[in-house]
Amino acid sequence: MMGTANAVANGDVLSLSGALDAESVLALRPVGRQWLEGAGAGERRLDLAGVTHSSSAGLALLLDWMRVAQDSGKTLRIDNMPADMAALARVSGLDSFLPRS
């Protein structure tokens, strides 16, 4: 079953909630890109406390946003990464590319 996810921006923090899967990340991708490309340099934080599940599509979304942040001259810090996403990152060797608080 495909999940739904939401993104709420509050200044330098983007909070995600729901399930990150192949369907939901398609809707979230432009939201995060716009937030990252917005005015202001410095650090942005991605809060994943509300994420209930993440497939590999969720991990791919974070990597995409990391690249957008870098291209926009910003850093992206990930807070409250869910255990299933952290496990996927570890197994795939991507753990060191995802800076977490």
Image: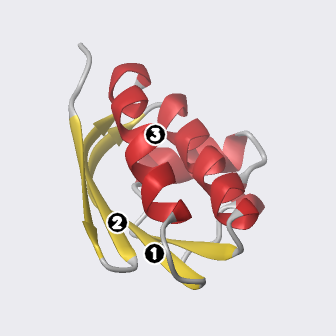
Q: Can you tell which of label 1 and label 3 is closer to the viewer? A: 3
Residue 51, position as x, y percentages in the image = 28, 50
Q: Choose the circle earlier in sequence order: 2 or 3.
A: 2
Q: In this view, does 53 lie above or below 41?
A: above
Q: Is residue 69 above or below residue 26?
A: below
User: Which residue type carries mark 3?
Assistant: Arg
Q: In this view, does 2 lie above or below 21?
A: above
In the rendered structure, the answer to whether residue 90 lies left or right of residue 2 reads right
Please give the residue where the numbered disc 3 appears in the rendered image: 29
Callout 2–callout 1 Cβ contact below 8 Å? yes
Give the residue displayed 41% in from the left and 32% down from the top: 25
Q: Is residue 8 above or below residue 101?
A: above
User: Which residue type carries mark 1?
Assistant: Arg
Please give the residue where the numbered disc 1 appears in the rendered image: 45
Residue 88, position as x, y percentages in the image = 59, 41
Please give the residue where the numbered disc 2 appears in the rendered image: 14
Callout 1–callout 3 Cβ contact below 8 Å? no
The Cα atoms of the two marked residues, 2 and 3, are separated by: 12 Å
